[in-house]
């Protein structure tokens, strides 16, 4: 059977993301010159998350790991669902966050660092619970925790209100609830 493009994307999206992250990082100085620090910080989050996704999914062991460690929590998790969730809630929504930052719409722009911070806290919780490495832990610790704290602080200093921060955090928590519902099969059971 001849492989299709959709099969290639399903198997290689995180590897393609690694290359894309490097290109985006190369463009970061241009973004800074054209926009400013707050917009640059939001722009960087797509690259950071793509690096994280590569650590999680680049070796093709993420799904097997979580099926072994959480058989009752994510019984309906599939590679196709991982693709939809990661491309939709990260690649697409982080792109939206970049545009929101251009217009100082911080409740949407801060979605990116808040989603990353919530994700990092989940990785840390799994580290504590399982007393060992879980896919994505290193980038969560090295990039997400310090980067999110710095970005949230820097954007708040230049004008993001408490309400905008709360909305962004609520969006991040809602998306993680969506992840859980997908894995449990409560929604999109057949993807």
Image: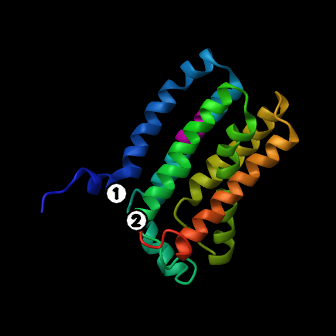
What's the residue at 25%, 50% (across, down)? Answer: 5
77 sits left or right of 165 in the view: left
Q: Is residue 141 above or below residue 109?
A: below
Task: Examine the residues drawn in magenta and state their main secondary structure.
Answer: helix
What's the residue at 40%, 56% (across, down)? Answer: 58
What's the residue at 55%, 40% (across, down)? Answer: 46
16 sits left or right of 107 in the view: left
Contact check, label 2 and label 1, Cβ < 8 Å: yes
Q: Earlier in the sequence, mark 2 or mark 1?
A: 1
Stretch in magenta:
43-48
Count neighbours of disc 2 (C-alpha within 10 A) and say few if under 14, some if 14 to 19, many if 20 or more: some
Pick whichever, 48 or 138, lies toward us.
Answer: 48
140 sits left or right of 121 in the view: left
Count neighbours of disc 1 (C-alpha within 10 A) and say few if under 14, some if 14 to 19, many if 20 or more: some
Please state, as top left, top right, bottom left or bottom right, where the N terminus lies in the image.
bottom left
> For residue 44: magenta?
yes
Q: Position of residue 47 (x, y in %)?
A: 53, 39
Badge 1 is on which residue? Answer: 10
> For residue 135: magenta?
no
Badge 2 is on which residue? Answer: 79
- Residue 126 lies in quadrant: bottom right
180 sits left or right of 83 in the view: right
Of all residues shown, which one is farthest toward the bottom? Answer: 72
Q: Position of residue 114 (x, y in %)?
A: 71, 49
What's the residue at 42%, 72% (across, down)? Answer: 190
The Cα atoms of the two marked residues, 2 and 1, are separated by 7 Å
């Amino acid at each position: 059977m001849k492989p299709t493009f959709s099969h290639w994307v399903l198997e290689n999206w995180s590897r393609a993301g690694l290359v894309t992250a490097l290109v985006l990082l190369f463009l970061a100085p241009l973004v800074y010159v054209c926009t400013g620090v707050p917009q640059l910080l939001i722009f960087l989050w797509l690259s950071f998350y793509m690096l994280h996704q590569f650590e999680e999914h680049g070796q093709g062991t993420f799904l097997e790991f979580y099926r072994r460690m959480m058989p009752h929590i994510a019984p309906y998790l599939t590679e196709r669902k991982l693709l939809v969730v990661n491309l939709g809630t990260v690649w697409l929504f982080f792109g939206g966050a970049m545009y929101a930052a251009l217009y100082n719409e911080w409740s949407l722009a801060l979605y990116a660092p808040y989603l990353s911070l919530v994700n990092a806290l989940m990785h840390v919780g799994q580290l504590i619970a399982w007393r060992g490495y879980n896919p994505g832990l290193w980038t969560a610790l090295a990039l997400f925790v310090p980067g999110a704290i710095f970005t949230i602080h820097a954007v708040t200093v230049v004008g993001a209100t408490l309400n905008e921060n709360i909305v962004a955090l609520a969006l991040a928590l809602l998306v993680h609830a969506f992840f859980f519902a997908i894995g449990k099969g409560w929604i999109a059971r057949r993807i």
